[in-house]
Image (cartoon, rainbow, N blue to C red):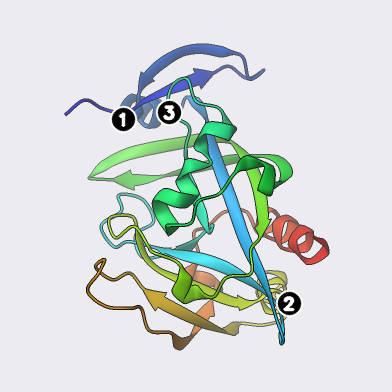
Amino acid sequence: MSQELFDIYDENDRKIGTLPREEVHAKGYLHHSFHCWIARDTPKGRKILFQKRQDSKDTFPGLFDITAAGHLSAGETATDAVREVEEELGIPVRMDQLTSLGTIDYYATGTAGGKPFIDREKCFVFCYLLNLPLTAYRLQQEEVAGLYETDLEDAIALFEGSKSVISASGIHSVQENIQMPKIFDTTLSLQQFVPHKREDYLHVFKELKNL
């Protein structure tokens, strides 16, 4: 099976080549990614959605993360990468439905499959106000273990440090055509989230609050 290819960039974000994913992460080459945060309005206020990464993921398994996200494959733009939303969440989305929040620089190191990785990304960040209940989503089982929503104000409080635990509702990924997902209640703490920079999380949350 051929490996996914990524375009790589220099410090001025000029393309300098194309390499396999594993080599990009092994050597820490700068590459591009797509982030889409989804929120919805309810009678109790605005909610923000998080996906829970599958336990089988090679990086940050089982942690809570951006609603939908993915790397840009070689030759792709952020417009092409909007496909990630439908792939992961089962919801078709057009780029003109999204609001751009600009870009952020992301850096992480760790171990995946027993091998060290250096992940350096320029992330194209978008948000989407989509008034659908959790049960309307059809999750990609290979990637997404569940989808959760919490009050946007509570998410801000959690990442600002004024709350240590917040309430959330969620659904687990289920096999297509076998059963409907059932909503359950749970709690979330900061330690359960992928360790993106707090200021990046808060920037997105506050933009969503004003959307």
Q: CA distance from mark 3 to mark 1?
A: 13 Å
Frontmost residue, 81 versus 94: 94
Q: Secondary structure at mark 2?
A: helix
Q: Position of residue 37 (x, y in %)?
A: 61, 56
- Number of other residues with Cα within 10 Å of mark 3, as a class: few under 14, some 14 to 19, many 20 or more: some
Check the image and name the residue furthest to the left.
Answer: 1
Q: Give the number of marks.
A: 3
Query: Of callouts 2 and 3, which one flags the residue occurring earlier in the amino acid sequence?
Result: 3
Residue type at mark 2: give it: Glu
The residue identified by callout 1 is 22
Is label 2 or label 3 in front?
3
Is label 2 or label 1 in front?
2
Q: From this view, report whether residue 191 is shown above or below residue 121.
A: below
Residue found 33% across the figure and 55% down from its top: 143
Q: Residue 153, labelled with which disc?
A: 2
Residue found 58% across the figure and 41% down from its top: 106
The residue identified by callout 3 is 73
Frontmost residue, 156 versus 185: 185
Q: Position of residue 36 (x, y in %)?
A: 59, 51
Q: Secondary structure at mark 1?
A: helix
Q: Position of residue 191 (x, y in %)?
A: 50, 71
Toward which corner of the image does residue 142 lie, by quadrant? bottom left
Toward which corner of the image does residue 104 lie, by quadrant? top right
- Number of other residues with Cα within 10 Å of mark 2, as a class: few under 14, some 14 to 19, many 20 or more: some
Check the image and name the residue furthest to the right.
Answer: 210
Residue found 46% across the figure and 45% down from its top: 84
Query: Of callouts 3 and 1, which one flags the residue occurring earlier in the amino acid sequence?
Result: 1
Q: Residue 51, labelled with which disc?
A: none
Could you tell whether 119 is left or right of 34 in the image? left
Could you tell whether 184 is left or right of 141 in the image? right
Residue type at mark 3: give it: Ser
